[in-house]
Amino acid sequence: MNMNELTILLVEDNPDDEELTLRALRKNNIMNTVDVARDGAEALDYLFCQGAHKARDPSQKPAIVMLDLKLPKIDGLEVLRRIRADERTRLMPVVILTSSKEEQDLLKSYSLGANSYIRKPVDFNQFVTTVGHLGLYWLVLNEAPPK
Amino acid sequence: MTGLAKLRNMGASLIARASIRWAALFLVSAAIIATASSSYREIDKELTTVALLRREAVARIAAVTLAEKFGRVVDVAISLATRVRFRELVNQEKWGEAIKIMHDIPRDLPHIERLFLTDTKGTLQADVPALPGVRGTNFAYREWYRGVSRDWRPYVSPVYTRAASPQINVFAVAVPVKNAGGVAGILVLQLRVESLLEWINTIDTGRQDFVYLVDSKGQVAFHSRHRDRPGIADMSGVPVVMKSLRGEHGVETGFDPVENEEAIVAYAPVPGYGWGVVSQQPLHASLAFATKEAQLRRLLTGYGFILLLCVLAIFMASRIAGERRRAEEDRRMKAELEQRVVERTTALQGSEERFRAVTETASDAVISADGRGDIIYFNPAAQRIFGYSVEEAVNQPLILLMPERFHEAHQRGLRRFLKTGEAHVIGKTVELAGKRKDGTEFPLELSLSSWKVGEEIFFSGMARDITQRRQAEERIQQLHRDLQQRAVELEATNCELEAFSYSVSHDLRSPLRSIDGFGQALLEDCASRLDDQGRHYLNRIRSSTQHMGQLIDDLLKLSRATRTEIRREPVDLTQLAQSVITGLEIAEPDRKVECRVQASMVVDGDPRLLRIVLENLIGNAWKFTSRTAQARIDMASFPDGADNRAYYVRDNGAGFDMAYVDKLFGVFQRLHTPAEFPGTGIGLATVQRIIHRHGGRAWAESEGGKGASFYFTLGAFSRPTPHEEQS
């Protein structure tokens, strides 16, 4: 499977962060498709092919979900909980990508089965490096769970 | 000692004393009885001996006298027979003429009843007074002949009854009439027993006594009691007679079958003649015995008296001793009682004084009342609290001190208590309302007790004005309410703070990241359109945003240090420090810092917070030695007090000015410019907060330019936190 056929789902409500994340991915030459959901509800619609994303092919699962925690409507932790609760998405790799490193967030995220927890640094150069590592790891090094 | 044991002891000593008394009595009695009986026997024996000796003396005197009489008769006979003329006539057998010489003899010697002459064959030849028909009669069968002819010596015959009338008892004294070559004839004097022995009657032998003479055949020759009895009584079978005839003398007592009485019998031989004398007296008639018995009776009476006196004396002595002992006991008990009275009186006075001292100086009102409910005692505190003087209060009813609405309940309670003894407030502490003289009411705490003197009942109460306490309680309750309110508010604030921190963590950082990110994008994408000045500004914007990001992170750390619960567990500080140093070395591999950490520093604390402390202290040291050649960082500990240790991180870096040491731990306080050393001024504040939350303290020392030392202690190693105590 071509690495570039793998889709990334970015769940991010802040357009600045969305743009900067995409820029960081491009700077790291990660050319995969990045679908963006702007709140928790949309992320769930996307993943379970419902609502606005009803028409989407359920077999096309993102290789990785980059999930922010502070989201409108349904927050990131709830999204994570539902992903892990559903048979279809139970094994899907989810990386928490957020501003906070509050202990409670870390604890809850890992408790709910997050695969990784990345804090977005303020320094953009550092952010680019971090996103590079993230892409390299999850898209290249890591073997995805069986479909 | 218990009363029972005392009684038992007293009983035992009484028995002991009684038995001593009885033993003494017994001993004295035994001694007296022994002495009495021994002297009784002694005196009995002596008096008996006296009595017997007397009887024996009578017998012997009689015997001796009789022997003398016999001697004289024999002498008379011999002198008659030896007359020369008489002898010649007998030699010539001129019996008639010879007897004439003797013609006057019976007249001169009246006890000689008759004389006669026989030839050697015993044939009577002549007699005077002459009896018809006897001349020529042979009397060789007579005792006197046999006696005298045995060896031709004078002989006194036993008694015999005269052949011729009157047939009286007589005895004969026969003497041979001798011539030149032999015996020519026999001269016989026949003596009348009566006349011979008349003299015995003249011997005063005593009352009811008698003497009798026995001849050599044991026949009674003379009996002073039975003088007129005819015939000759043979007594040869009587033991005393036999003894006297055997030549013995003596005295004995015994029953005499002849006289049919107890008798003293003395016997003696008549020496030379084979006769005996017996002297006899009935025992009861013996004066000596009577005397003896009287004496013994007197003796016994005397001893009896002595014994009685002794018994009496012992009895009296023991009575007196008992009395004295009782008196002594009484005196001792009285003294003891008096001593006790004195002690009790002293104690009572003491307790009275103590009571006075206590009640007079007590801060509580002490009030006593009698059974009618009238006040009888009112102490100074009561006067102060209620406002009445003693004179105003005493003899007034207790209701004086109560608000009117309680009067009836009080009277009812008092009546019920006096009637049934049922108490609702006595013995308890109750809170009531009191009324002062000025009519104002106040809350009081009252402890009531009752006591009895004889039948009369009294009450005592201790009352305390609890106005202030009430106020204090109310204040405390108000404070408590306030505190609860504050706690609720604090809880809310905490929640807000939590939310705020969360918000800061997420939301404040986002814009910064945007500023930095787009600034960088601008630099990268539009670099050609920017001149150096523009690029410089953009760089300044980016560094400020990054500093802001650092500030936010540090503030969050400080907030976390304040908010999070401390979970104490053993923490290896050595390992923690080394881990922090390793982190620093990785972050700045170009730095060469000599780090030395003391081994095995294990403390009791929260590992996450202690990591923040070391990150700050070692991080600071790392930072402030950045311009020092041969930088060095030491971490070690030393004893602090008895059971605690202090820890320090020392560097040889820039140090600080001790003038500002008190600012060092304040938030946002920096002693260096960012140009010299970067920093937010929050790190040491966080350190201090964490150390304080562990119950320890933090301080610092420095000599400017020669490095700095940061010290901290943690609470006692095993001290449980309040949280743990609750769980």
Image: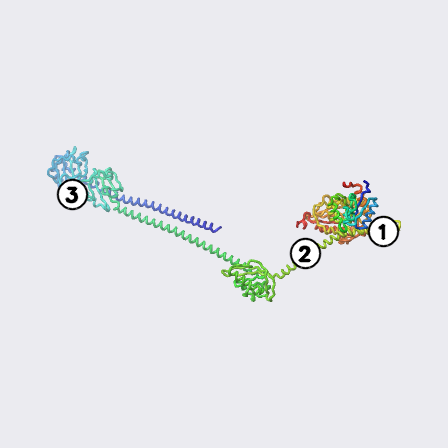
Category of crowding for the residue at label 3, using alpha-carbon neighbours closer than 10 angstroms: few (below 14), some (14–19), many (at least 20)? few
- N-terminal label among 2 and 3: 3
Q: Amino acid at mark 3?
A: Pro
Q: Which residue is mark 2?
A: B484
Q: Amino acid at mark 2?
A: Gln
Q: Which residue is mark 3?
A: B110
Question: Marks 2/1: CA distance?
Answer: 52 Å
Whole-percent x, y for residue B668 in the image: 77, 53
x 16%, y 39%: residue: B161
| Type of amino acid at the residue the image marks with label 1 | Leu
Regarding mark 1 in the picture, which secondary structure is present there? helix
Camera-side residue of B319 and B412: B412
Of the residues under marks 1 and 3, which one precedes in the sequence?
Answer: 3
What residue is pinned by disc 1?
B538
| Residue A25 in view of the camera | yes
User: Who is closer to the viewer here, B395 or B135?
Assistant: B395
Count of marks placed on residues: 3
Mark 2 and mark 1, same subunit? yes
> Which mark's residue is nearer the viewer, 2 or 3?
2
Nearer to us of marks 1 and 3 is 1
Of pointers 2 and 1, the one earlier in the residue sequence: 2
Secondary structure of the residue carrying tag 3 is loop
- Helix or strand or loop: what does disc 2 sit on? helix
